[in-house]
Image (cartoon, grey):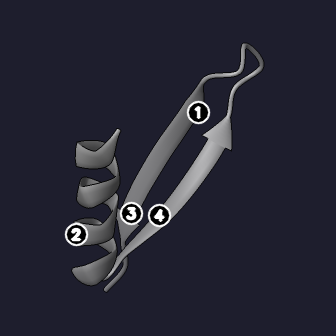
């Protein structure tokens, strides 16, 4: 869990937009996109 959160923080630090989507079965999907 911590490693995954670290990855998300690193993406945020690099300017990525992080979007989390909850699927119907309860799975949380993380979508990272970079603009510019």
Q: Residues within 10 Å of mark 3 (few under 14, many from 20)?
A: few
Q: Residue at x 31, y 86 (%)?
A: 36
- Tell which residue pokes out farthest to the top in this image: 25
- Label 3: which residue? 33
* Mark earlier in primary sequence (1, 3): 1
Quick check: 8 left or right of 24?
A: left
Image vertical order of residue 8 relative to residue 25, above or below: below
- Label 1: which residue? 28
Question: How far across and how far down the image is residue 23, in percent?
Answer: 69, 26
Q: Residue at x 47, y 63 (%)?
A: 18
- The local secondary structure at tag 4 comes to strand
Q: Residue at x 72, y 13 (%)?
A: 25
Q: Residues within 10 Å of mark 1 (few under 14, many from 20)?
A: few
Q: Nearer the viewer, mark 3 or mark 4?
A: 4
Question: How far across and how far down the image is residue 1, in percent?
Answer: 35, 38
- Tell which residue pokes out farthest to the right in this image: 24
Marks 2/1 in contact by CB < 8 Å: the verdict is: no
Q: Which mark is residue 10?
A: 2
Q: Nearer the viewer, mark 3 or mark 2?
A: 2
Q: How many numbered dots are placed on residues in this image?
A: 4
- Tell which residue pokes out farthest to the front in this image: 2
3D distance between C-alphas at marks 4 and 2: 11 Å
- Label 4: which residue? 18
Q: Residue at x 34, y 75 (%)?
A: 12
3D distance between C-alphas at marks 1 and 3: 16 Å
* Mark earlier in primary sequence (3, 4): 4
- The local secondary structure at tag 1 comes to strand
3D distance between C-alphas at marks 3 and 4: 7 Å
* Mark earlier in primary sequence (4, 2): 2
* Among the 4 quarters of the image, the one containing residue 9: bottom left
Image vertical order of residue 31 relative to residue 16, above or below: above
């Amino acid at each position: 869990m911590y490693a995954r959160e670290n990855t998300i923080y690193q993406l945020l630090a690099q300017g990525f937009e992080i979007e989390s989507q909850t699927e119907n079965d309860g799975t949380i999907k993380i979508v990272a996109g970079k603009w510019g």
